[in-house]
């Protein structure tokens, strides 16, 4: 079997000149083989940058486009191809967007391998530890209270026992944050777990500690990315002293960044995004690192049903894969792109058993939201 073509498909809901929210754009890839098998992957990154990294012509040996590195190769040789892509993109890569692009391609290679061998990806990864995985729901708060109460009631109706909010203006004004959390706690009661995502908005360690103290009554399950990601010293002190679990890592790529993050900041929870960290292949190394450093791995995931499927297969095959994020975005790229989107049922997702990732894409959705030049 040989790779004969790679499609990079940039999807976007709003027009290019209008604001775009998390979940409203995506870069998906399709790897075509000479046997007719097609693998699907995605990265939750900047679609235009990733598209360039895949399609660009080579400048020299360590600055090559990823498409060119894969054409003609056997897609089943995933580990060798992963290393070939990293090595061939070293000058523009090693971290960040090039690893995001490799993540999408890696996921598509695993999808092809599963289809070729006639087994789900979680079987290729060594076998599933569970048939269903508990999910937590993430939402971006709206400016008005009634809307937020409505969102939270809908989350509860899906059987969720754990929810997270972040984004919008959250983290910018402590009194507004307290007012919002009071409303949310009123709606969910004391038994549902509640975590917050600061997206690095608290200014520094001292400021973060003050805010943690002010929010202590809301019994937070974790605080996510409380500080700018390069403030390792502040994050370490906060992890050790604030008394609330600290999480982070959704923007990191490769085992090397995760090792430094785990060693330097000692988070309770580490949150790689399988479409950014280096794909399914690299997630295995990060899962092992999390175990070594005593952190719980709870992956980030807020994009299409392709990301969701890759995450679910991985977490099913991870011994510690007990909690995943389930997007509450109403973007058609989450709701409709994958025709057989893995549903949330009474707070859990069922682990699929079809070969590969088992996702079927809706060509009409692709056609409607595809960015064309
Ligand atoms: Mg986050």
Image (spheres, rainbow, N blue to C red):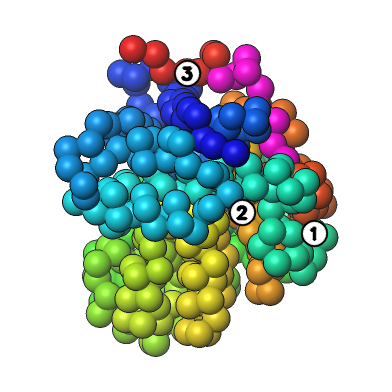
Work out how far the residue at label 2 is from the one at label 1, CA to CA, in angstroms.
13 Å
Mark 3 sits on what residue?
370
What residue appears at the point 63 percent right and 18 percent down from the top-left corner?
363
Is the C-beta separation of discs 2 and 1 under 8 Å?
no
Label 1 lies in ligand 1 vicinity (Cβ under 8 Å): no
Q: Residue 290: x, y in percent?
A: 51, 77
Name the residue at 65% across, 31% down.
35
User: Who comes first in sequence, dot 2 or dot 1?
Assistant: 1
What x and y, as percent, mark residue 257?
A: 34, 68
As measured in the structure, the alpha-carbon distance from the residue carrying label 3 to the one carrying label 1 is 33 Å
Image coordinates for residue 293, horizontal then vertical, percent: 47, 84
Q: Vertical placement of 315 versus 112: above or below?
A: below
Compared to residue 363, the image places residue 251 above or below, namely: below
Q: Is residue 317 visible?
A: yes
**What separation in Å lies between label 2 and label 3 (alpha carbons)?**
24 Å
Q: Earlier in the sequence, mark 2 or mark 3?
A: 2
The image position of residue 266, as x and y in percent, is 40, 82
Residue denoted by label 1: 132
> Which residue is nearer to you in this view: 307 or 139?
307
Residue where numbered disc 2 is placed: 311
Ligand 1: does it lie within 8 Å of the C-beta at label 2?
A: no
**Residue 359 magenta-highlighted:** yes
Report the magenta residues as a range. 358-366
């Amino acid at each position: 079997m040989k790779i004969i073509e790679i499609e990079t498909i940039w999807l976007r809901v709003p027009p290019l000149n209008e604001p775009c929210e998390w979940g409203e754009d995506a870069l998906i890839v399709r790897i075509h083989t000479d046997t007719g098998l097609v693998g699907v992957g995605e990265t939750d990154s900047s679609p235009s940058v990733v598209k360039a990294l895949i399609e660009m012509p080579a400048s020299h040996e360590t600055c090559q486009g990823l498409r060119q590195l894969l054409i003609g190769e056997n897609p089943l040789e995933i580990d060798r191809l992963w290393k070939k892509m990293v090595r061939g993109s070293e000058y523009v890569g090693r971290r960040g967007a090039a690893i995001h692009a490799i993540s999408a391609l890696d996921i598509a290679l695993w999808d092809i391998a599963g289809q070729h061998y006639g087994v789900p990806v979680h079987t290729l990864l060594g076998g599933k530890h569970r048939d269903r995985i508990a999910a937590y729901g993430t939402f971006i708060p709206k400016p008005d209270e009634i809307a937020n109460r409505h969102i939270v009631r809908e989350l509860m109706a899906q059987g969720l026992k754990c929810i997270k909010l972040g984004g919008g203006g959250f983290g910018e004004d402590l009194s507004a944050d307290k007012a919002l959390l009071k409303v949310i706690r009123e709606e969910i009661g004391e038994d549902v777990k509640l975590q917050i995502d600061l997206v690095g908005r608290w200014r520094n360690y001292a400021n973060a500690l003050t805010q943690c103290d002010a929010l202590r009554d809301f019994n937070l399950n974790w605080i996510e990315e409380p500080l700018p990601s390069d403030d390792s010293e502040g994050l370490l002190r906060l992890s050790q002293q604030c008394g609330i679990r600290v999480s982070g890592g959704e923007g990191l790529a490769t085992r090397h960044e995760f090792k430094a993050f785990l060693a330097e900041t000692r988070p309770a929870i580490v949150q790689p995004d399988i479409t950014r960290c280096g794909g399914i292949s690299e997630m295995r190394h990060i899962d092992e690192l999390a175990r070594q450093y005593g952190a719980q791995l709870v992956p980030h995931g807020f994009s299409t049903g392709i990301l969701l499927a890759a995450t679910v297969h991985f977490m099913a095959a991870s011994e510690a894969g007990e909690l995943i994020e389930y997007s509450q975005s109403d973007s058609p790229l989450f709701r409709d792109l994958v025709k057989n989107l893995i549903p949330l049922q009474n707070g859990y997702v069922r682990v699929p058993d079809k070969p590969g990732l088992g996702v079927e894409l809706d060509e009409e959705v692709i056609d409607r939201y595809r960015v064309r030049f």
